[in-house]
Structures are given as structure tokens and as C-alpha cells.
Image: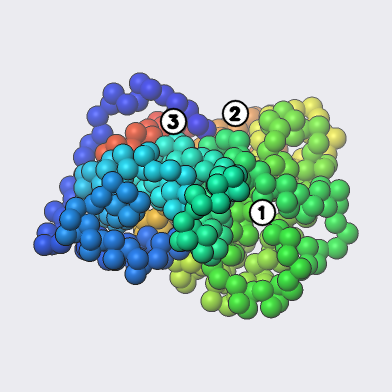
Amino acid sequence: MSFPLEANEMQTVAIQARRFRAPKQTPNRILYLCEMFPYEINIRNLVVDPSQLTQYAREANEHEPGWDGPGCLVLLACALASSSHAYSAATARNFAEGSRQRLESLPNSLLAIQYAYLAGLYEQYVMRPESAWGRLQDACVRFQTLPHIEASSPNSANDEDRGSGTLRQRLYWSCVKAEFELRAELMYSSSSVAAEFEILHRKVTSEMATGINAVTPESLNFFGSDENPSTRSCRSTKYHEEDLLRGAMSHIMNDIYSKSWAGWIPELPNLIKKCAEYGDLLETWRKWLYLSLAFPHPLSKTPSAPKVADSAESFLLQVNYLCIVELLHRPFFACVLSRHDCIKSVGHQVLIPLAQQYLQASCALIQLVAAAYFRYEGTWTLVRRSFGCSLALLAAVRFNHRYRNSSTEPLPVPREWRKILQISIDTIWRWERPGVEDLPWMRRILEHMLEVVEK
């Protein structure tokens, strides 16, 4: 499903521009954008001190941004605040280019890592995932080399760097979370920072791979802490819960998606066992959620649209939860489509319900993604996942049409599959922007395939 990103000839096709409102004119644009940053961007990525940013913005507004760390931070904040409003994309590009020139000249430090992460965050906002991956890898490499620099040169780190233990921790989890989010769609290898996270918590994965006799709340702890889930959930924040889901997603990708689909077929019984164990863990995690972050189960027994969570924070947890359910059941859907002889050893009576759960998760995910009208750094990954689920839905329809006169058991496709597919097409169209080449092609591919399937 990565071919829209790899087709160079697509870049020559003109993308129809949208009509946007003119940007609001303010006498102090830098101050205005830096004041927007804590509410538009920093509310989900707490790696910038708002009071310090305001101080830097006032100095930059008076003397122009300097070629140092504070000047780079101000330009990055302005670029991110501008990118959250589509009408000022050109302004965001100008700020981002200025910050890039300054970032490349900065020596490695904790603040340089902060700026590299924010540069990757900007690329996520403007829906350039491969560029975002490169920026995040830069931040991870700087993170890995920073302890060696501090150890070899004790005087190289300033007091601000050494006194920022909270910032260091937040940057670490922000980099790991962003990498896991992009990796789920790009399927790239983990960085050294993320690999350290995976090695540290490999015990949970190995226990799940060998089998767990009883699912307990204590076994939910992907982060290796001995903290009781009942007390943890009462004082945990939305960021911790989101990190927890991202960690679970990484475990599943390493445990199941380290092989191609051909490698799934001989291990179907083991995959079924793992899917049940991971599913029980996820469901127990959902029940332990703090009340303000709780969300309704996204999979309904009726064909109606899933019930959307009340707040933006719980909505994102709900979507990520459903993404993991979709990842868990995707191998069984692929095995049914392959019609391989090894499937007979398991039986269609076992695989068809699992493939049906995948289709239910895909349809629910398409409708949930369509409900997200707010823009944030994970918008591209959600739209991309909606596109992938739509391709799977079309594949199921095509499968039933191709083998309708044979003894092959059909896949239970929902009756309103055309409506759900149109929802995905409309969602992609809504997020199309000049300069984002892959989204128009995702939409056109679905429109063309829908015409082919209905013939």
C-alpha cells in the first residue's frame, strides 16, 4: 500500500488549489504566532516552556530572530502555529526554512534535540511523512550521542541543559511516540532510541509469545514499572496512556509483522493465540482507563457507525486502540484472500470470523477518521490508515465477486460498503493540500477501483 509514495511521475500532475481565507494581519506577527503555539501545538507536545518562548519571541520581534538556539525555537514555533491553519501555508514554509538553516549550524545539545524534534513535528503537520522521519531520526541520533558528549566534555553542556530532567524525559517519549506512529505506516526500521525502548520491554513480548495463562492487570505494564494499574490510572495523563498504546503497537509490529504475509500462513495457530492474548490485554487496558479518558468500544455488533468519544484526547485513544485491533486481525484477512492450502489445517470456520473482525475494525476506523476535523501531527497517518482499510474493503468485495460461483466461503462484507468507501474518499479529499502529492492519488485510486469493482 506504499505505491502512492513511490510514484515519481505523480508529482507532475497539477493539484487543484483550494480557496483559503486571507491570514489575519497583526502588527506583531511573531508574537501573535508564538502566543498561538501553546494552545495549538504545545498542548499535545509539552516540550517547550511557554514563558521562555514568550521571552524569546519578544526579543525576536524587536531585533529579528538571531542565528542561535532561541532564534531557531521562535521560527519553529511560528512555523508550527502557521501550519495549524491551512490558509497560511506559505508563511509556515518561510518560517520553517529559516529554522532549518539555524538548526544545521547548532552544536549537539538537549535544546538542539528539542529543535530537531519540533522540525520533525512540523513535517508531520504539513503531511510530509518521509521528511518527518528524517528529522526525527536526526533527533534520535543526537539523543544517542548526547551522553557521550556530556561524559567526554563536562563543560560542554550548559546549566539549562543539565537542569532539564523533565524536558529530557518528555523529549525521549515524544521522539519514541512519533517514530512508532510513522513506523506503523511507513514500515521502516526502528532507530537506536526506539530499539533501546523495545529491548527494555522485550519481557512482556516474550511472555505473550510463549503464552499467558491468565490475563491480569499487572501484565498490562508495557513500560516495565511495578506500579499498580488502579493507582496509575487515577493519576496518569493522556500522554502516558498514548505512550502506552504506542508501545503496545510497537510490540505487535515486532512480534507479528517482522515476517511477510507468506510467513504468517505456516504459523496461523500461533498467530490466533497471540491475537487473543493481545486483544485481552488491550481490552483490560481500556477498562482501567481513567474516567475522563474513557471511550466507548469502537466495534459495535450492529452495522451502525461507531460511537465517537466525547473529548479530543479520548477520541485519539479510541482511534489508536482501533488501529491496534486492525493490525492484530490483518494477517487472518490476508490469509483468507490467499486461499492457501495451509489454511485448511486451521479451517475457514476459525479464520472467517477473524477476517470479519478485521473488516469490522476497518469500517469503524474509516468512519472514526472521518469524524476527526481537527488537525494535528498524526493527521496523515490516520488518512493513510483510512486509505489502507478502504483497499482491504475493496479487496473483500472483489474476492466475493470472483469466487461467487465456487465453493469458497464468502467474506461477510457490510451492505453499506459503498457508503463507507465514499466516506473514506471524502475524508481524503478534505485533507488534500497543495504540496501533498500522495493524498490526491489515494483518492483517485479508490475512485478508479470502485468503478472497476462495480463493473
> For residue 429, what is the image quadrant?
top left
Name the amino acid, label 2. Answer: Arg
Q: Could you give the CA–CA distance between mark 3 and mark 1, rounded to whole angstroms?
A: 26 Å
Q: Residue at x 41, y 24 (%)?
A: 7
Which of the marked residues, 3 or 2, is nearer the chain's N terminus? 3
Neighbourhood count class around disc 3 (C-alpha, 10 Å): few under 14, some 14–19, many 20 upward? some
Q: Is residue 436 left or right of residue 293?
A: left
Q: Is residue 350 above or below residue 368?
A: above
Badge 3 element: helix
Q: Looking at this view, name the residue that lies furthest to the top.
A: 9
The answer to whether any part of residue 390 appears in the image is no
Give the quarter of the figure containing the C terminus: top left
Q: Is residue 407 left or right of residue 31?
A: right
Which of the marked residues, 1 or 2, is nearer the chain's N terminus? 1
Q: What residue sits right under mark 2 in the picture?
A: 402
Locate residue 117, reporting x and y percent.
45, 49
Q: Is residue 354 above or below residue 434?
A: below
